[in-house]
Image (spheres, rainbow, N blue to C red):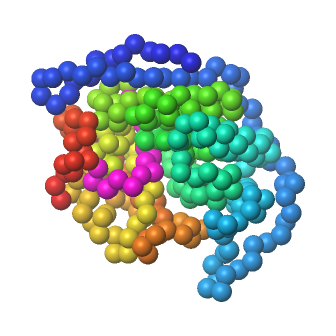
């Protein structure tokens, strides 16, 4: 694990802030191409629901059912045998590490598959489509927490350069250990507030895709992420969306002010249960213009004072 020197960051007004950025890069051998092989899991089909949707494992599903469902669906996006092993190793490492450091509220191994992993899989139709548009692909997962969805993406797509970002040092330390354990040569972790990171030249408007999986309001998320997204790139928000999409309507002005435009909304095909009648969705925002350098504002301001509608 290495520490880089602290870059100077200019904040709003004349005050200057010092940003401590923890960057860890693995130096293991490059990924070899993964060749899929036949699954060792049974080829049993999922039983349909009464409403015609495919059955998905709920919170009570045992590990072998939850993992089987995830792996069978991940194979649609090119999951190979080596990657399957890596997913198992990461799930076990996350549960074990979570006993010492609180990273996730999910305490059961089965829930890592039915919640974290399956939620990550919702992104892949969008990721694969956007990947076709560029020769190389740089992605940053803002507020990565337990490394979700950044690490699953790095496992599935060794051709992506994945940066995990979090404001909490202990979470970035976990990222670094997981990256090393899995041998992910295409991943790194950056310890910083997103409000600060967006003003560092090395990161500002450098990413083809910025991802955030958060309960924060969309107006807050776009201020944290669009400054990191290059012009022509995209921001993808994994959001639990309410009927009527009022939150997205309220965020349109902020998105335009920051140089973006909502491109499309895709709903979770697995119908993962959400509360209050909401449904998990993927909101795709295209970056059309450079973001004014006054954004993002000082740490905490985007949350306390969201951009006006």
**Residue visible at 63% across and 33% down in the picture:** 178
Residue 138 appears in the figure: no
Look at the image and give the residue range highlighted in magenta: 203-220
From the viewer's side, name the closer residue of 144 and 54: 144
Q: Where residue 34 sits in the image (x, y, percent)?
A: 76, 40
Q: Residue furthest top?
A: 5
Work out which quarter of the rendered image holds the N terminus and state it: top right
Q: Is residue 111 above or below residue 134?
A: below
Q: Position of residue 244 (x, y in %)?
A: 34, 75
> Which residue is outermost to the bottom?
50
Q: Position of residue 30 (x, y in %)?
A: 69, 26
Mark count:
0
Side of 70 where 209 appears, left or right? left
153 relative to 38 in the view: left or right: left
Please say whether residue 24 is one of the residues in the magenta stretch: no
Q: Which residue is located at x 78 percent, y 59 percent?
A: 64
Can see residue 286? Answer: yes
Residue 121, compared with residue 279, is above or below; it is above
Vertical position of residue 166 compared to residue 42: above or below: above
- When the figure is inspected, residue 68 is found, relative to residue 170, above or below; the finding is below
Considering every residue shown, the one lying at the far front of the view is: 100
> Residue 257 at what x, y percent from top left?
20, 49
Question: In the rendered view of the protein, which quadrant contains the C terminus?
Answer: bottom left
Instruction: Residue 25: name its quadrant.
Output: top right
Q: Nearer the viewer, residue 61 or 101?
A: 101
């Amino acid at each position: 694990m290495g520490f880089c020197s602290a870059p100077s960051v200019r904040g709003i007004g004349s005050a200057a802030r010092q940003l401590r950025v923890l960057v860890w890069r693995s130096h293991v051998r490059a990924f070899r191409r993964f060749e899929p092989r036949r699954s060792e899991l049974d080829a049993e089909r999922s039983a349909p629901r009464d409403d015609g949707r495919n059955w998905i494992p709920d919170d009570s599903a045992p590990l072998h059912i939850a993992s089987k469902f995830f792996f069978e669906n991940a194979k649609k996006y090119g999951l190979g045998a080596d990657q399957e092993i890596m997913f198992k190793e990461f799930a076990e490492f996350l549960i074990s590490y979570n006993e010492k450091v609180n990273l996730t509220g999910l305490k059961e191994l089965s829930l890592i598959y039915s919640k974290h992993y399956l939620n990550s899989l919702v992104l892949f139709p969008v990721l694969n489509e956007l990947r076709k548009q560029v020769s190389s692909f740089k992605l940053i997962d803002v507020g990565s927490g337990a490394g979700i969805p950044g690490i699953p993406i790095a496992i599935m797509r060794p051709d992506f350069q994945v940066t995990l970002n979090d404001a909490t040092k202990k979470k970035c330390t976990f990222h670094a250990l997981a990256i090393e354990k899995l041998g992910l040569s295409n991943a790194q972790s950056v310890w910083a507030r997103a409000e600060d990171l967006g003003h560092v030249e090395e990161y500002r408007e450098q990413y083809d895709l910025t991802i955030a999986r958060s309960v924060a309001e969309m107006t807050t998320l776009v201020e944290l992420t669009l400054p990191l997204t290059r012009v022509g790139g995209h921001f993808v928000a994994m959001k639990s969306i309410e009927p009527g999409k009022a939150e997205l309507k309220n965020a349109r002005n902020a998105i335009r002010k920051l140089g973006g435009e909502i491109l499309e909304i895709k709903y979770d095909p697995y119908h993962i249960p959400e509360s209050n009648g909401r449904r998990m969705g993927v909101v795709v925002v295209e970056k059309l213009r450079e973001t004014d350098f006054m954004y993002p504002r000082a740490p905490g301001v985007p949350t306390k004072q969201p951009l006006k509608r």
